[in-house]
Amino acid sequence: MVRPMPFGWGRVSYMWDYRSKWLELPFPVSEYEQRIDKIRKMMEPEKIDCLLVHGNRADRAAVRYLANFEDFYGGDSVVVIPAREAVGMATNAIMHGEPMHSGIQQVWMEDVRCAAHPRTVDKAWTIWDQLEDMLKERGLAEATYGVSGDYADDVVAFIRERFPKAKVKKVTGLLPRAMAIKSRLEVEQIRKACAGADAALTAVMENCKPGVSEYELAGLANEAMFRLGAEETAFPIAMSSGPRAGFKHTAPTDRKLQLGDLVYTDLGCRVGGYYSDCSRNRAVGEPTKEQRHFMEANVLINEACMAAARPGAVIGDIAKIAIEVAKENGYEDYLYFRGHGIGTTTHVPPSFFPGNPAKLEENMVFCFEPMLVKKEFGTGCVEDIYRVTKDGVENLNKCPARWW
């Protein structure tokens, strides 16, 4: 039983027989089915009968990865993955009481159940009522549940209250492990997002001229990404110049570039649910000797580290290379060794930090961004996205690194 939306809302049907003809998917359904199969295999050693994956606006990656649902409104979403029964999803991330206003047509799963968000109306049945119905129909009242998600405490409380004979435990590492290794189709989607970032970075770098404002540069970057198919920016664009460039991440202002400024930008876009996150820097006009050495040192760090990156490489060992190159160039005190996996959000495993014993694996995709940050001087950071191949890494970006 699917409970209807309250108060006559939901006038556009979101039942599968109508919704299916409006599906908006970046991948064939078989891609999502393979992900569910992978998750189910990972559930077996955990002895889980059903995995409940929670997501919201702050932790949205897993829900997009599994269901292709993007929360436009802000609410709770729970993907239901039983070991054997049909998958489903329940959500209250519903605008105007209309599921088809809210991106439900993006979900490939047939069984989707929607509820009004409490801030919309507080005297109606809830997402938890929908979820209870779904689990009872699948015979899971006394199951062993795994719960995943950074903000999933309400899901745990729901199971304990509604299903007192069930067992429940937090499963924190399962989804990140599954999402760290990318399929061929995922890599191609990230490649498209990288193309949007490349176009934006190029637009910024080519227009770093005296009198051009940070706002104007940000506008050119966003225009370039959306012209190439971005559905959204990855995050608020960072755009800094002159002394402000020594903060790295700052929002653009009306400040106009001056000859001799260092300019830094960090930006990205989302295409088909997959993100890019990339950076570039340059001087306005001819750089000074110190500026050139500063920016060049960052590129040398990138090149040395990525020459050592391959399956089995230990991230902590790559950090040692970065520290050594920074030291050789006199910038050890300004180095931040950073990097992160990317996919349906900007930060998934692996995480790059000194001392990390984790090893790279084939078909991991990550942003590599070791940065030199010197206050009131500038930021040297070239950030690209790499795929781990069988014997090295492939740079998915095409924008030049050196603009000096």
Image (spheres, rainbow, N blue to C red):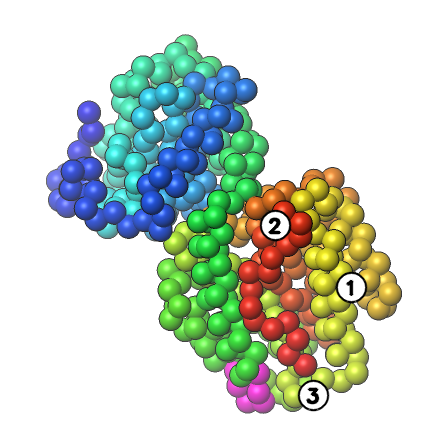
Could you say which is closer to the camera, residue 393 or residue 159? 393
Under circle 2, the secondary element is: loop
Quarter-wise, where is residue 304 in the image? bottom right
Residue 290 drawn at (x, y percent) = 79, 79
Q: Nearer the viewer, mark 2 or mark 1?
A: 2
State the residue lying farthest toward the front.
391
Q: Who's the residue at 44% across and 75% down the image?
A: 219
Q: Dividing the image into 4 quarters, which one contains the N terminus?
A: top left
> Taking 348 as reference, is 172 above or below it?
above
Q: Which residue is mark 1?
A: 334
Going by the image, does 338 lie left or right of 82?
A: right
* Span of residues in magenta: 208-213
Residue 130 appears in the figure: yes
Under circle 1, the secondary element is: helix
Give amino acid for label 2. Answer: Thr
Q: Which residue is mark 2?
A: 389
Residue 273 drawn at (x, y percent) = 41, 52
Going by the image, does 368 lie left or right of 122?
A: right
- First in sequence: mark 2 vs mark 3: 3
Residue 340 drawn at (x, y percent) = 61, 50
Q: Which residue is mark 3?
A: 286
